Image (cartoon, helix red, strand yellow):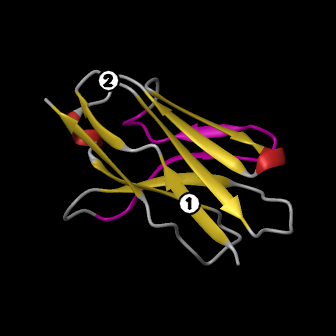
Amino acid sequence: QVQLVESGGGSVQAGGSLRLSCKASGIIFSIGVMRWYRQAPGNQRELVAGITSGGSTDYADSVKGRFTISRDNAKNLMYLQMNSLKPEDTAVYYCNIPQLPIWGQGTQVTVSS
């Protein structure tokens, strides 16, 4: 069974850090692009960052310089290191693989001022 499982969320004060993880399991092909999305209450889901299998990355302007995306291809893991967190980063964070029509359950990130 193919699954995406996010973890690492929590509650922090502004300026703090969190590291999110995404584990892709049940996959028998080489994963291409992997992405992090987030969705705040009342908002649409938005793209946060993406990474190719070769390690090329891109970020939403709102997180550039604060977030770092990485992955471990051998373990089908993806990470999102989030530093200098702001209250506006509060959201449920999801990982996504465009090759798959599924989403994980997400992990909640709450940043207080």
Question: Can residue 80 be seen in this snapshot?
Answer: yes
Packing grade of label 2 (10 A; few <14, some 14-19, many >=20) is: some
Give the left or right position of residue 107, taking residue 100 as reference. Answer: left
Packing grade of label 1 (10 A; few <14, some 14-19, many >=20) is: some
Residue at image point 69% right, 48% down: 77
**Of residues 76 and 35, the one drawn nearer to the viewer in this rendering:** 76
Residue at image point 59% right, 40% down: 79
Question: As displayed, is residue 30 above or below residue 2?
Answer: above
Q: Earlier in the sequence, mark 1 or mark 2?
A: 1
| Residue 16's disc number | 2
Please identify the quadrant where the N terminus is shown: bottom right
Give the left or right position of residue 9, taking residue 78 as reference. Answer: left
Q: Residue furthest left?
A: 113
Which range of residues does the magenta coloring cover? 44-63
Gap in angstroms between the C-alphas marked 1 and 2: 23 Å
Verify whether residue 85 appears in magenta: no
Question: Can residue 53 be seen in this snapshot?
Answer: no
Identify which amino acid the numbered label 2 is placed on. Answer: Gly
Q: Secondary structure at mark 1?
A: strand
Q: Nearer the viewer, mark 1 or mark 2?
A: 1
Verify whether residue 52 appears in magenta: yes
Q: Secondary structure at mark 2?
A: loop
Please state the horizontal and vertical placement of residue 49, each as a whole percent of the image: 53, 45
In which quadrant of the rendered view does residue 60 lie? top left
Please state the horizontal and vertical placement of residue 74, each as a whole percent of the image: 84, 46
Identify which amino acid the numbered label 1 is placed on. Answer: Val
Please state the horizontal and vertical placement of residue 55, each as a whole percent of the image: 75, 37
Residue at image point 65% right, 63% down: 97
| Residue 98's disc number | none
Give the left or right position of residue 12, taking residue 112 as reference. Answer: right
Q: Where is mark 1, residue-wise?
A: 5
